[in-house]
Image (tube, rainbow, N blue to C red):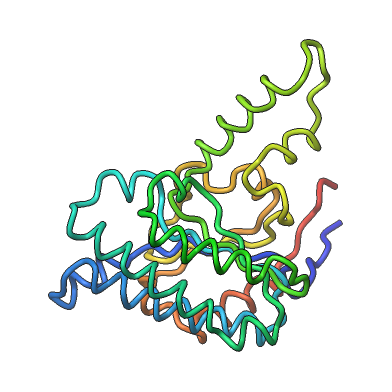
């Protein structure tokens, strides 16, 4: 029997594709697309808080983004991160809504010390908040996360230990956050990438928007949430 899913997802994850294409269409530099995307993210976080979403995850960059992009674009991207996290540190909205901020991925290996210090300050400031969660995935790959988890498990547990779903979750970068209910990918390409949150998204609903991320505004986010609320699932029946 078909069952209607809960009208509001507890955990929404966004794959924000299309910043560079948005900039190209406007004859702008790639980093100007990333700048527009960062400004849009601020609006979407506010919208998510208004809608009562408990957990919002945002894939800011993959490992490949940081390793393969031209130096000037990478430098501009890191500068955008610095300003974004500085704004988060001073955000009244984050404090009033008691939003815990997690930064997930290999950013500590990839980012300069000044940026790491800014990010660590935001994490420390919000670590005791419990009402809402904002996860920013930086220098992150789901495939890398799973490989690292398997390596950690191999080193931690005795030979013959029964590996359970709980043990796997405990060793993921995402160990402290709930499973993903709803994945939204912008940019008009209907696929996932790099094993994005592969363990946590095992039962997630998917939504693909034709809008490039800077144009995926609050109205488009609202359409996606409405679409989710209207869906039905069998839940294995």
Residue 61 x, y percent position in the rendering:
40, 55
Q: Is residue 230 visible?
A: no
Q: Residue at x 77, y 11 (%)?
A: 159
Location of residue 138 in the rendering, given as x and y in whole percent from the top left corner: 46, 55
Look at 62% across and 45% down and name the residue there.
173
x%, y% of residue 18?
33, 65
Q: Is residue 3 above or below residue 169?
A: below
Regarding residue 237, the answer to whether it shows in the image is yes
Relative to 191, 197 lies left or right = right
- Horizontal side of residue 165 vs 20, given as left or right: right
The residue positioned farthest toward the left in the image shown: 27
Residue 134 x/y as whole percent: 61, 68
Q: Name the side, left or right, on which 177 lies relative to 122.
A: right
Q: Quadrant of the N terminus?
A: bottom right
Residue at left offset 58%, top offset 85%: 47
Q: Is residue 154 above or below residue 82?
A: above
Q: How many marks?
A: 0
Taking depth in this image into account, of 115 and 150 the one nearest to the observer is: 115
Is residue 99 rendered to the left or right of residue 69?
right
């Amino acid at each position: 029997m078909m069952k209607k899913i809960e009208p509001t997802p507890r955990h929404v994850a966004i794959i924000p594709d299309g910043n560079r294409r948005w900039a190209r269409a406007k004859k702008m530099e790639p980093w100007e697309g990333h700048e527009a995307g960062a400004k849009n993210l601020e609006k979407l976080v506010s919208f998510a808080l208004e809608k009562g979403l408990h957990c919002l995850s945002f894939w800011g960059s993959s490992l490949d983004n940081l390793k393969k992009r031209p130096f000037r674009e990478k430098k501009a991207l890191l500068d955008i991160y610095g300003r974004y996290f500085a704004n988060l540190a001073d955000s009244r909205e984050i404090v009033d809504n008691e939003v815990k901020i997690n930064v997930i991925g290999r950013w500590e290996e990839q980012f300069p010390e000044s940026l790491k210090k800014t990010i660590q300050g935001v994490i420390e400031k919000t670590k005791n908040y419990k009402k809402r969660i904002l996860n920013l995935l930086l220098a992150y790959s789901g495939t890398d996360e799973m490989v690292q988890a398997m390596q950690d498990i191999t080193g931690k547990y005795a030979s013959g230990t029964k590996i359970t779903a709980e043990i796997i979750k405990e060793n993921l970068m995402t160990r402290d956050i709930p499973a993903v209910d709803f994945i939204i990918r912008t940019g008009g390409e209907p696929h996932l990438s790099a094993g994005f949150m592969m363990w946590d998204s095992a039962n997630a609903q998917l939504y693909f928007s034709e809008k490039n991320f800077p144009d995926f505004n609050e109205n488009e986010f609202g359409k996606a949430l409405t679409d989710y609320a209207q869906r039905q699932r069998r839940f294995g029946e």
